Image (cartoon, grey):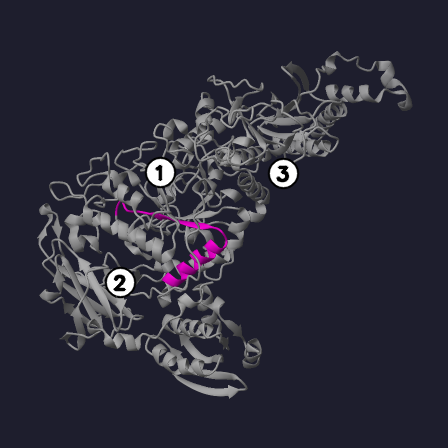
Amino acid sequence: MNITVSQRGEVSIAAILGEIDGKTAPLAQAQLMPILEATNKVVLDMSSVSYLSSAGLRMLLVLYRQATARSGKVALVGLSEEIKDTMSMTGFLGFFEVSDTLDAGLLSLA
Amino acid sequence: MAELTNVITPALDVQERRIDYYPTHDYNGYQLRPGKPYPFGTTLVPGGVNFSIFSNHATACTLVLFEKGGGTPLVEIPFPDSFRIGNVWCMIVFGLDVETLEYGYRLEGPWDPTAGQRFAPSRIILDPYAKAVGGREVWGQPPDWNDIFLQRGRLIFEDFDWEDDRPCEIPVEDLVIYEMHVRSFTADPSAGAKHPGTFAAMREKLPYLKALGINCVELMPIFEFNECENDRVSPETGERLFNYWGYSTVAFFAPKTSFAATGKFGMQVDELKTLVKELHRNGIEVILDVVFNHTAEGNEMGPTISFRGVDNQTYYMLTPEGYYYNFSGCGNTLNCNNPIVRNMVLDCLRYWVAEYHIDGFRFDLAAILGRDPWGTPMPNPPLLETLAFDPVLGKCKLIAEAWDAGGLYQVGSFPAYGRWAEWNGKFRDDWRRFLIGEPGMAGAVAQRIQGSPDLYGWNARGTTASINFITCHDGFTLYDLVAYNDKHNWANGEGGTDGGNDNHSWNCGWEGETDDPAIRELRRRQMKNAWVALMVSQGVPMVLMGDEVARTQFGNNNAYCQDNHLNWMDWSQCAQNADLLRFAQRMIAFRHAHPVFRNIAHLTNTDYAGSGYADITWHGTEAWQADWSDNSRVVAFMLDGRHAKGATQTDDMIYVIFNAYWDALHVRLPGLSHDRRWHLAVNTGMPSPRDIHPTGTEPPLDNQGSLLIGPRAAIVLVGR
Amino acid sequence: MSALTLPATLDALEDIGQFVKETAVSGGLDTGAAYRLRLAVDEMATNIVSYGGVAEIVIAATVTARDVTVTLVDNGVAFDPRRQALPSEAALAAPLEERDIGGLGIFLALTGVDRYDYAREGETNRNVFTMRKAPAAPPT
């Protein structure tokens, strides 16, 4: 798992590559948390995430809670069907702005 | 929304300061320290997991850890003697992967069956407090009986984001309960569910439940059970027979993994909690059917899964020779009034209320819960009393199936402590017998209409002690009640002898399916009559899944083992029987619209509100002249709207006439005071859609003085 | 026994016709008998709903191996059609425009079926129409 961060205006874009499971979720959280603290708007580009375990979902929800506490926003883009499905059935999906493409994701934070 | 309270503070720097977050021992590279005895089971602590298990008779204990699905353990860690406090072994293990870990125990102790001791240290034992169970993720997949550990304890995160949800606390008299089986609801292809038979699929069907108008679902067992515990096939089809309904618990703290589409990812807990949260959002409570009378381990011939291997003598009621008492009819009897087992039951229910926001419980064969460790019924059973007075359970519904398989029948006499309600078997039997036209039933149904004061009046339990039902999972469906005289249980593989014989059913002229329109019409009418009976009676109505669309089990009155169309809801019936579905929806809405059906105290037959009418008055074919003779098959009653909910609310006048006679009858109506007029809400003799009119659109009767009621019909009038 | 309660209006006639047709089919009546039964019930029902003071009408049917019975029940004033003067042979022979329509309807109702009975029970009128089934063909 690794994360590439870029900036588009006031929005930080974090593109995650690989699998997020119980082992990698804390690493992802450690990298993403400072980004949230630095900017109020973050897009998580999930299009290259091939697997997301429950620990990964929880990491996303922690980020979301952290962002809302600072009046920030987190948007998810490029979720695979399987991940979206799991998130929906376990109630995680409803918390996030979800878009298919990066442009749409940026728009949702505007 | 209390967003701020949900902010998670990174606790790393805080954690570093606490002494008990550091290991003290090392076992083959696993970092350990002495654990905390409470709470039992597993608890995530910073950096590790606290494991705690009790046994009053074990001599030693070993923690066995697996990688998910692993054939051999990762490690077996014997509890150092210093980690035992009293009879509890507790240990923190650091550095575990919560998501992929599976765990069990080996407990050493005597093998002395006559003394009740059956320790089996060669077996790996499931933690009785396991909060999730792995190993059986796919429904119906035959288990590998050679697996050294079939049902495996798993760890869960307890961090579900409930937002501001909590149990609904709908007043019990306002409930309309829908008894259902999670898998049966959506397993059939006609459900069109993405993941058939799961919690997630049930959530997809919430609009259906909402439209039906029920405000409480009672889920047949959803604690982990092994549907493959039987090894039998149907003599009719050769298909495998299952322990389908699930009245055979393996783990009381764990949701059934294969009822979750995400069970294979270990996310069954989140999926179920999401379902509960969504149900609550739609104003629907969740009651769980819990089976504390026995476990899946059966008698001395059964498998050792958990309790038997942890502390047989504590968990089970044993004869002086060490055999299992069988008050449950299922091989063993959980020793519920042993203080330790009682505490486990309490821990379990508190857990489901606190962690899953469950609104109430229905206790299978609850009369057993009032027996002492030797099987004798107690006048003041500590378990029932404890549950009734527990603060965490303080607002939840407690419902007893007030009988057991050992012959104890306590309908009306179940120890209630002002809290317990009962499945009212008398309601079911009396209404069934009245509706098929048996003589001598008019007086009995008059009691049922009033909330059964004959059963619950003597100790002032009120109407809400009575869960009113005409059908439930045990016995015929509503359609089968009007389509079969006799049970047809051959497919269950017990020679057709299983299931009850006192069905009080009538096939309306032909046993089973028929094209005869006359028989079909009569069956429809009889089903509608039953819906009316349920919805106009005081007490708490409960309906069985599918009865709103004439679901059939083809005469099987005990389909406990059938994973097929005998249990599954056929969603195409929603269109085929749209008129019945519409009738059921409207009838439920009618009850919700009229508080006069939902009194808490029993009706008094007096005018305590000073309105000029008694709260209930009784009539017959002549107004003010009830006929209670044996030959009477007509019961008519009037509810005075100013006595609604103990005269705290004002409602319309309601007049209800049941004609269980086989011929049409002329009925004179009581006059209404002032400028009120009778309006026709329901007439089951009329063809759909004139059989029921939505609240507010009921047409006034042309003839306010009398009417003609058809054979075997029910009429409901609203006076306003 | 199937049964239907209907508001006593002209709209009920369609439901009654349908009910009799279904009964005749399930009872195995031949086409001619089915037609005469429907005509008889329809004429009597028309008479009942056209008469004032009746709110509901109940139609019920019983099928046995030998016959098909349809019963109309209403709670109007007592009316035994058998006591009404039936049209005379002369009246029936009269040209159409001179006939008494109502009387003819009752006539059709009473004579088209194999058996007709009337009873006044309490506050209700009961008109019972019976058609015998054609005997089954002898086995060959």
Q: Residue at x 38, y 80 (%)?
A: A28
Q: Quadrant of the C terminus of chain B?
A: top right
Label 2 residue SS: strand
Q: Quadrant of residue C22?
A: top right
Residues beneath discs 1 and 2 located on the same chain: yes
Range of residues picked out in magenta: B269-294
The numbered mark at residue B128 is none
The answer to whether mark 2 and mark 3 are in CB contact below 8 A is no
- Asked whether residue C7 is drawn in magenta, I would say no
Percent across and percent down for residue B448 are 44, 29
Q: Residue at x 50, y 75 (%)?
A: A73
Residue B280 shows in the view: yes
Comes first in the chain, label 1 or label 3: 1
Which of the two discs, 1 and 2, sits closer to the camera? 2
- Asked whether residue B282 is drawn in magenta, I would say yes
Percent across and percent down for residue B688 are 63, 38
Percent across and percent down for residue A109 are 55, 77
Residue under pointer 2: B153
Give, as a three-letter code, the residue at label 1.
Answer: Gly
Comes first in the chain, label 2 or label 3: 2
| Depth check, front residue: C72 or A65 | A65
Q: CA distance from mark 1 to mark 3?
A: 38 Å
Percent across and percent down for residue C71 are 64, 23
The image shows residue B631, relative to residue B208, as above or below, that is above
Specify few, some or many for label 3: CA neighbours under 10 Å numbering under 14, 14-19, or 20 or more. many
Residue under pointer 3: B693
| Depth check, front residue: B416 or C17 | B416
Residue under pointer 1: B499
Q: CA distance from mark 2 to mark 3?
A: 54 Å
Label 1 residue SS: loop
The chain letter under disc 1 is B
